[in-house]
Image (cartoon, grey):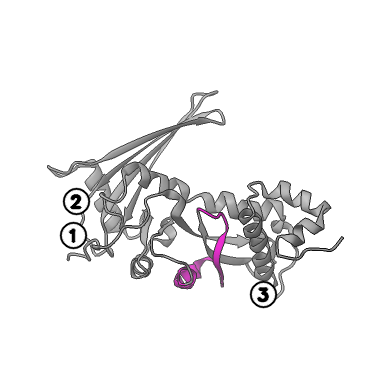
Amino acid sequence: MGGAAPRERPPASSGAGHGIALDGNTLRGSRNQRAPGVHLSSALGYHIGCLLAPRAVGDKTNEMTRVEAVLRPCVLPGRVVTMDALRTQRHVAQTIVDGVGDYVMIVKENPPQLSADIEWVVTLPPAGDPHPRARTIDIGHERIEPRHITTSEVRVGYSEWPCLAQVFAIGRYVIMQKTGEERSAIVYGVTSLRPEHVTPGQLLAFVRGHWHIENKSHWVRDMTFDTDRSPVRCSNIPQGLAALYHTAIGLLRGAGYPNIAAVCRQLAAQPARALALIGIVLEN
C-alpha cells in the first residue's frame, strides 16, 4: 500500500543548528530498592543547547506515551526533529509532520519490514536510482573515524511511513591509532526532508548532531550538578529539581557561557552576577 507522499510546502531549515533532538534520560539518584528511578522524556534545541518541555514518565517502557506531550509545546515549523530507534514510530512521525516539522529517524528492528526494505535498497539498488552520497573523516582522541551516508528515494510512494521522502544508510568506522584495532557499524534511517531541501552531508550532520542532547544536557546535569548521587526520591521532587537544573543550564547558555561547570564555580563566588541573570540587580 502506498503511503503519504512528501509534502509540497516550504522546507525545514537544512542547517543542523535548527534541529530538535528527542530523547529520554533516567535520574539515577531517584532509584531505590522498591522502585526504578524517575525517567524524563524531553527534547533539546540544537541551537540553544537546553531542554524543551521535559516530561516525567512512569518508566522507560512507557516513554512512547509521552512523546506527543513533549513535542506539542515545541515550535516545529522550520525545525527538524531527530531521534534514536527507540522513538521511531509512525505516530511520532505523524505528530511531527502534522506540526509542519520534519523528522530524521534511525531505524533498527522497528518496524522490521522498513529496516529490511532500506537494507535491500542500499545493498541492491534498483536501476536508475542515483544514490547520492557524502563522506566525513574525523581525527582525534587517538582514533580516526570515517563516516559515509548513502540516500535513496526509491521507497517514496511505496511505504506507509508518513511523508517519507528519503531513506538512508550511514556507515561508521573507527580505527584506533595506537593499536590499529578497527570497528564498524551501519545504521539505517528515514526522513521527510526532500533531496532538493537537504544534501546528504547535511542529513549526516543532523544524525551526528542528535547526540548534542547527551553532551549538552544529560552529561552536564549529571556531572556538573551531581544528580546521580542525589538522595532525593520522594514524590515529584526529583523531576522538580531536574527542571531547576535545566532552567539554570538554559539561562547560562542563553547568556553565552559554553562551559557550564566553569561558570557555576565563578557564580558561586559572585552571587550578584547569578542574580543578574534573572533580572535582580543588587544595590551597592
Horizontal and vertical percent for residue 11?
31, 57
Tell me if residue 260 comes above or below residue 142 in the rendering. Answer: below
Whether residue 34 is visible here, answered yes or no, is no
Q: Nearer the viewer, residue 234 or 9?
A: 9
Q: CA distance from mark 2 to mark 1?
A: 8 Å
- Does the magenta portion include 55? yes
Q: Nearer the viewer, residue 71 or 75?
A: 75
Q: Which residue is mark 3?
A: 236
Per the image, label 2 sits on a secondary structure element best described as loop
Count of numbered labels shown in the rendering:
3
**Could you tell whether 94 is left or right of 59 in the image?**
left
Whether residue 164 is visible here, answered yes or no, is yes
**Residues at marks 2 and 1 touching, judged by CB atoms closer than 8 Å:** yes
Q: Which residue is mark 2?
A: 154
Report the magenta residues as a range. 47-72
Q: Report the disc number at residue 158.
A: 1
Q: CA distance from mark 1 to mark 3?
A: 46 Å
**Could you tell whether 249 is left or right of 123 in the image?**
right
Q: Quadrant of the C terminus?
A: bottom right
Specify few, some or many for label 3: CA neighbours under 10 Å numbering under 14, 14-19, or 20 or more. few
